Image (spheres, rainbow, N blue to C red):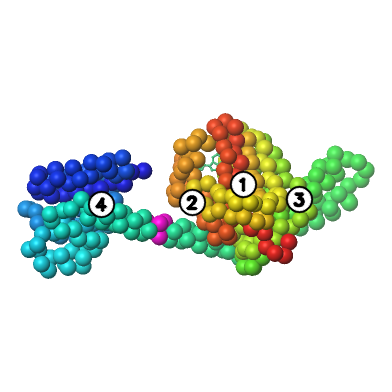
Amino acid sequence: MKKQILFVDDEHRILTGLERMLHGKRDVWDVTFACGVDEAQKALEMKKIDVAVLDINMPGKTGLELLSEIKNNTETKNIEVIILTGMLDGDLKYKALELGAADLLNKPVQKEDLLARLRSVLKIKAYHDELVEHNVLLEQQLIQSQKMELIGHLSAGVVHDLKNILMGISGYSELIVFSLDGNSQAKDDLIQIRKSTQRATDIIQQIHRFSQQGVKVEKECSLGLIIDECVNLLKHSFSKDISIDWHTSETIWLLEAESIQIYQVVMNLCVNAAQSMADGGRLQIRLSEVNLEEESGSKKQISASGHHVMLEVSDTGIGMDPETLEKIYNLSFSTKQSQGGSGLGLSIVQRIVRNHKGFIKVKSQPGCGTTFSVFFPLSGIN
Ligand SMILES: Nc1ncnc2c1ncn2[C@@H]1O[C@H](COP(=O)(O)OP(=O)(O)OP(=O)(O)O)[C@@H](O)[C@H]1O
Ligand SMILES: [Mg+2]
C-alpha cells in the first residue's frame, strides 16, 4: 500500500514547489497538499496519513498547535510529523521536537533534503508500527495462554465431579442389568447407556489431559504426541461430515519448544481448516522430514536450511483467492467476523513459528481447499 503524506502550508506558492519536487514519487507515495489548517484537518479526518509535513507559522492555528493536536488524539498520534521552519523560528524548533515532531526541515526546502528526511521518517514509522503490532500480538498470545492455564486448573475440578456423576450412572445401570433376567430389550438398552457413559468419561479425561499438558512449560515437546492429543479432542467437536485423516506417527518428532505454543499452532490450523468446510470434507494432517537446501516461506518469513519436520494441514474447504492470501497473517484480518472470528489465529501461529526459527508456506485456490505447510527445525535429539 502506498504511504500517505500530507503537506500543510498557508502559501500556495510553497505547496506548488513541493508538488514539483515530489512529482517523480507519485507511484510510491500518495501525496495530499492542504492550504491552511482547515484543509489539513479535513485531510486528517478523511485519510490514514503516515507522515505530515507542517509549516510552523500559519494564520489561525500554528503548525505547533496542529502538531500537538495530532499527538494528543488517539486516532492520529502515530502520524510522524516533520516541521517546516524558517531562519527566524529560533526556539520554536526545539519546542516542536519537545511536542513530538520527528524531524525539522529548513525553508527554502531543497529537494534532496526533503526526500532524504521523508525516507528516514517513513523508516522510523515502519519500525514503530511493527513494534506496536508485536506488542498487541504478544498481549493476545499471553491472554490465550492464560486462558488455557485457567481452563487447566478449572478442568481438574470439573473432571472430578463429572467422573463421579458418570460413575453413579454407570454403577446403577450395572446393578439393574444384573437384576434383569434373560435377554430383555431393557437389558440391551442399559448396556448401551453404560457404553455411552464410558465414552463420556474418556472424552472428559482427554480434555483434562489436554489442558494439563498445555499448562506445563517444557523445553522440548513431541509434535507427534501433540497432534494425537489435538486430534482426539477435535474429533468430538467437529461436525460428523468432516473426516480427519491422521495416522499416529511412529517418530515422535522432538521440537525445542514449549508444548503450549505448539498446541496453539496445531489447533489454530485445524480449526481454520474445519471452519472452511462448513458442508463437510476431509482434514488431512501429515508429518515428514525434509532436508532443506535453502528455502524460505511466504511473506515476512525467514529462510532456512537443514533438517526440518514439515507439518502439513490440508483441507478440502472453500480455499482462498490471492487477495485474501496476501492478508491472512495481518493482525485482526478475518473473513469470519460475523461468526465471531477475531483474525488473531494465524498472526499468533506466524509469531510462534518464527520464534522457533521455522517458517510457513500456504497453497490455496478458491473452491479447491488449502494446505498450510509449517517447517520447524528438528532438535538434535531426534
Ligand atoms: N484453511 C483455510 N481455508 C480458508 N480460509 C482460511 C483458512 N485458514 C485461514 N483462512 C483465512 O484467513 C483468515 C484469517 O485466519 P485467522 O485464523 O487469523 O482468523 P480467523 O479464523 O478469522 O479468526 P480467529 O482464528 O481469531 O478465530 C480467515 O478469516 C480466513 O479468511
Ligand atoms: Mg482462525
Q: Which residue is mark 3?
A: 248
> Which mark is in front, 4 or 1?
4
The tag on residue 300 is 2
Q: From the image, state whether disc 1 or disc 2 is nearer to you.
A: 2
Q: CA distance from mark 3 to mark 2?
A: 32 Å
**In the picture shown, does residue 57 fall above or below 335?**
below
Name the residue that disc number 4 marks.
Answer: 115
Q: Earlier in the sequence, mark 3 or mark 2?
A: 3
Specify the segment rendered in magenta.
129-133
Helix or strand or loop: what does disc 4 sit on? helix
Note whether ligand 1 is within 8 Å of mark 2. Answer: no
The percent position of residue 273, horizontal first and vertical second, equals 60, 42
Distance in Å between CA atoms under marks 4 and 1: 41 Å
Crowding at label 3, few (<14), some or many (≥20) Cα neighbours within 10 Å? some
Please report the residue visible at 54 percent of the width from the left and 57 percent of the height from the top.
Answer: 354
Q: Tell me if residue 378 is in the magenta stretch.
A: no
Label 3 close to label 2 by CB (< 8 Å): no
